[in-house]
Image (cartoon, rainbow, N blue to C red):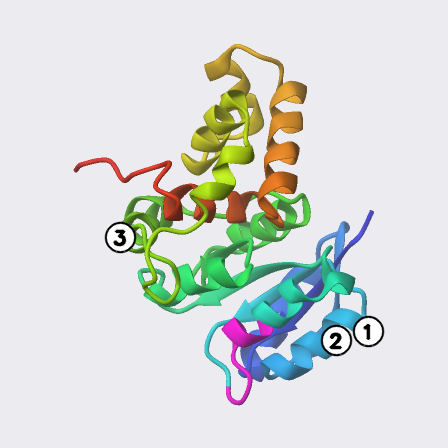
Amino acid sequence: MTIRVLLADDQALLRSAFKVLVDSEPDMEVVGEASDGAQAVRLARSERADVVLMDIRMPGTDGLAATRQISADPALAHVRVVMLTTFEVDEYVVQSLRAGASGFLGKGAEPDELLGAIRIAAAGEALLSPVATKGLIAKFLAQGEGPDGEGPVHGERLNALTTREREVLVQVAGGHSNDEIAERLEVSPLTVKTHVNRAMAKLGARDRAQLVVIAYESGLVRPRAE
């Protein structure tokens, strides 16, 4: 199955470079290019994109606003957004995860990293780099405040989870794959996948990245002391 990729960046030269790279792969193709967020949302719908590579900073409707619109549209529930940023250590990255992005990638990433990110997002996995997990998420989300500083969020929703689903959620928040979680909890990968899917359904999470956000914002997971 070919992964349909949409490029959203106000720099035409950068879009061209990404297009050449993506189109060189047999399992993916660029189906559209957008120079701002509003156009990205329209093209995501009309071109049936699977993954959007979304620049955070664009004129007009920026990448954050566009990601929120995509995440809020039931017709675009299958679309995964990978946020592109020049500075990886940036609170905008946390905002992008809250907005519904599957993860983020620095614009200075190697070609293989970019292609891998597209495949990871298309598969519904969370694309969270070690820097994000150790720095950004720990610094901002683990403060236990919602987007507007209104205090802990999601805490009551966790009551809907079983004990095992909570255990799996903690492992997901640690960035572990299904196979790694299965080994740690001594269960099968299929069982882990079932628990992950049930947790997403109960918590209203689009993908694993959203589970990570919920785990930190609820206080279920706290950053390790350095």
Between 173 and 47, the one lying in front of the other is: 173
The x and y percentages for residue 4 are 76, 60
Circle 2 residue: 43
Mark 1: which amino acid? Ser
Circle 3 residue: 139
The x and y percentages for residue 57 are 46, 78
Tag 1 and tag 2, C-beta contact below 8 Å: yes
In which quadrant is the C terminus drawn? Answer: top left
Tag 2 and tag 3, C-beta contact below 8 Å: no
Question: Magenta part of the protein: which range?
Answer: 59-66
Magenta stretch holds residue 172: no
Q: Secondary structure at mark 3?
A: helix
User: Which residue is located at x 65 percent, y 67 percent?
Assistant: 70
Residue 46: assigned label = 1
User: Which residue is located at x 66 percent, y 76 percent?
Assistant: 40
Which residue extends farthest bottom? Answer: 60
Residue 64 placement, left or right of 74? left
Residue 96 placement, left or right of 1? left
Mark 3: which amino acid? Lys
Between 27 and 91, the one lying in front of the other is: 91
Which residue extends farthest left? Answer: 226
Which of the 4 quarters of the picture holds residue 107?
bottom left
Mark closer to the observer (2, 3): 3
Marks 1 and 2, Cα distance to the nearest angstrom?
A: 5 Å
Q: Residues within 10 Å of mark 1 (few under 14, many from 20)?
A: few
**Reading the chain from its start, which is encountered first: label 3 or label 1?**
1
Which of the 4 quarters of the picture holds residue 71?
bottom right
User: Which residue is located at x 41 percent, y 47 percent?
Assistant: 129
Marks 2 and 3, Cα distance to the nearest angstrom?
A: 34 Å
In the rendered view, tell whether residue 76 sits above or below residue 142: below
